Structures are given as structure tokens and as C-alpha cells.
Image (cartoon, rainbow, N blue to C red):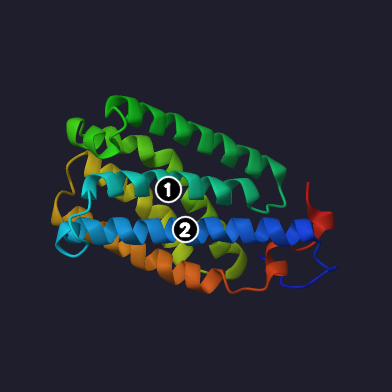
Amino acid sequence: MGDRQAYEPLTMHDKVTVILYRAGIVFSTLGMVFLAVFSMTTPEGWMGGINARGLSNGLLYLLVGTIGLSVVFIHLYVSRFHRFLKRLYLVGLAGMLVLALVGKGDLMGAFEKHQYAPLLLLPLTGCLGFVTAKEAFCFQLHEGYLLALLMPALIVAASVGLLAGPAVSGSLGLVAVLLVVFTLRKVFMPLHYDIGDKSAYQ
């Protein structure tokens, strides 16, 4: 479980890394919210004729970067878990590179050309799911467990044709809502919650 006790004053490094970790969570959530909104509406109708595909691609790239921010700066007592998470993220980056090559920079195009292309997002959703599950375990943010299970399950379901059209949009909306709840409960916690007992780090 998470340690809510402040064992010693936080250093500037402690504060910066916690803020960056939480910033990754916040911007990942915002990216997912906008993706969900765009999947349910026609952005050109209310944003003055924007390039919806280009914006969706940009949001996907943003998600990659912000998930990486949380992966790099997460505080874990057991170092082998952190090493595993970083390796999983590198696999996710490789998957994104494949998608970018297949779509010639257009990630959405890659999804349209190949039904199973979304499976390449599994490592990245695994990283985000690890973060939410870690917080669920440490601080009883139980929606984090649901997110960790739901996100990869939805990707697999969409890839094999069990979800399509409005069902995909609705699923993205559900994930976005859960992430908003999770984020609002997490980001306002005292910074020292994420550091805990430094003597316990391995």
C-alpha cells in the first residue's frame, strides 16, 4: 500500500519528478478525452473546419509522449518493476514506429488499412494500465484496476471485430471518463505520497 507518511523533507528533485509524473497522467487523460470527443462528434462542425485526422494523429503522438513521461518518472520501490515498465514502453515505441511507417505518418490511416493494427498499441496501454493499477494498489483508486483491464481488452475487441463504429466511440468515452475520475483523485494528493520511504527503494 502507499505510504502517506512524510519521512523527510522533499528535495527539489523529488518535487520535480513527482510533478512530471503527474503531468504525464494529466496530459494522457486530456489526450484520451479529446480522442473520445472527436470519435463521437464531427470536429469540423464546431472548430472551424480543422483537420480532424491530423488532430487525431497529433493526439495519439501526444499520448505516446505523456505516457512516457509517467513511465520515466514513476516512483517504485522495486527497481525491477521500473525496468520492466521502461522496456514495455520501448516496445510500445517500436509499435508506434511500425504504425507510422505503415501509414506513412498517418496513424489513423494505418488503423484503416489493417484491422489488427490497433494491437500494436497494447504495450502503451499496458504502460498506462500499469500506472493506474499501481495507484489503485497504493491509494485505493479502484478505477485504476478497471482501466488496467479495460483498455487492452477494448483494443483486442476492436481488432477482432467485436467492437466497431459507435461501440468504439462509446468505449473510448468510458475510458476517458474513468481516467478523468482517476486523475482528479490522484493529482491533488500531497507530493510526498509518491515518494514514501526512500530507504525502502531497491
Q: Which of 48 and 139 is in front in this view?
A: 48
Mark 2 belongs to which amino acid? Phe
Tag of residue 188 = none
Q: Residue at x 36, y 52 (%)?
A: 151
Q: How many marks?
A: 2
Q: Which of 82 and 50 is in front in this view?
A: 50
Q: Residue 133: tell me if it is visible.
A: no
Contact between labelled residues 2 and 1, with CB atoms less than 8 Å apart: yes
Could you tell me which residue is drawn at 72 percent across and 62 percent down? Answer: 15
- Measuring from the top left, give residue 68's x and y in whole percent: 53, 45
Give the residue number, with chain letter if any, for mark 2: 27
Q: Name the residue under label 1.
A: 62
Image position of 31 (left or right of 114): right
Residue 43 can be seen in this image: yes
Q: Residue at x 52, y 73 (%)?
A: 185
Left or right of 42 on screen, residue 60: right
Quadrant including the N terminus: bottom right
Q: From the viewer's perspective, is residue 93 above or below residue 191? A: above
Residue 41, given in percent of the width and then of the height, sits at: 17, 61
Mark 1 Cα shell of 10 Å, populated few (<14), some (14-19), many (≥20): some
> Which residue is at a point 28% across and 62% down the rendered structure image?
173
Residue type at numbered disc 1: Leu
